[in-house]
């Protein structure tokens, strides 16, 4: 299965889980919840699509879905996606299982927003060194873990 076929085959739950895994698996639970909130906030606006999957796969929004955003991370996300799509998957890593549980909460509407309505985020390091133009045009809402959140 090609990467494009994998992206086409994942459902909302799998796509959200993989996005969280690819973007913030190294963060504490609070940081993972915050990024899930950003995705939920984007979904609520309709600007990035009307499904969890469309929001997560919207072009150039989440680097884990782009080889240019980091080839090693992208390859790992694709590997985990293939595992989730396998009808008889092997044991999934703890970080991915945690992201699946968090995705379930988000999809069920049981995830409180700790970001103040944020629809964007970036790492604190990037924000300090070279903030992108879009970050200068938005209101910073909170810093959680190693990420700055904006709306």
Image: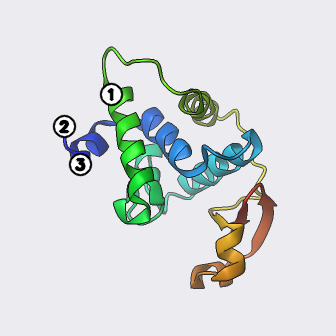
Q: Measuring 59% from the left and 27% from the top, which residue is drawn there?
A: 94
Query: Where does label 1 land, which residue?
Result: 85
Label drawn at residue 1? 2
Please tell me which residue lies in front, 91 or 1. Answer: 91
Mark yes or no: residue 150 visible: no
Q: Residue furthest left?
A: 1
Q: Position of residue 31 (x, y in %)?
A: 72, 48
Q: CA distance from mark 1 to mark 3?
A: 14 Å
Please tell me which residue lies in front, 90 or 107. Answer: 90
The image quadrant that residue 140 belongs to is: bottom right
Q: Position of residue 91 (x, y in %)?
A: 46, 18
Query: Taking 100 as reference, is 37 left or right?
Result: right
Q: Position of residue 4 (x, y in %)?
A: 23, 48
Tags 1 and 2 touching, CB below 8 Å: yes
Mark yes or no: residue 119 visible: yes
Q: Position of residue 78 (x, y in %)?
A: 35, 42
Q: Secondary structure at mark 3?
A: helix
Locate the C terminus and report the quarter of the image it occupies: bottom right
Mark 1 or 3 closer to N-term?
3
Q: Measuring 67% from the left and 84% from the top, which residue is drawn there?
A: 136
Q: Measuring 61% from the left and 48% from the top, which residue is drawn there?
A: 24
**How dense is the environment of label 1, judged by Cα within 10 Å: few (below 14), some, or many (20 and up)?**
some
The image quadrant that residue 131 belongs to is: bottom right
Query: Where does label 3 land, which residue?
Result: 4
Q: CA distance from mark 1 to mark 2?
A: 10 Å
């Amino acid at each position: 299965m090609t990467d494009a076929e994998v992206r086409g085959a994942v459902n909302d739950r799998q796509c959200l889980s993989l996005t969280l895994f690819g973007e913030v698996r190294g963060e504490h639970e609070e940081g993972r919840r915050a990024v899930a909130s950003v995705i939920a906030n984007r979904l609520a606006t309709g600007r990035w699509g009307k499904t969890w999957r469309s929001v997560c796969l919207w072009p150039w929004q989440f680097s884990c879905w782009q080889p240019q955003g980091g080839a090693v991370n992208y390859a790992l996300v694709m590997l985990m996606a293939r595992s989730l799509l396998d009808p008889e998957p092997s044991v999934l890593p703890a970080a991915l299982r945690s992201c699946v549980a968090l995705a379930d909460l988000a999809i069920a509407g049981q995830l409180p927003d700790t970001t103040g309505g944020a629809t964007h985020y970036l790492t604190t390091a990037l924000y300090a060194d070279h903030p992108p133009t879009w970050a200068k045009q938005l209101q910073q809402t909170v810093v959680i873990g190693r990420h700055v959140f904006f709306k």
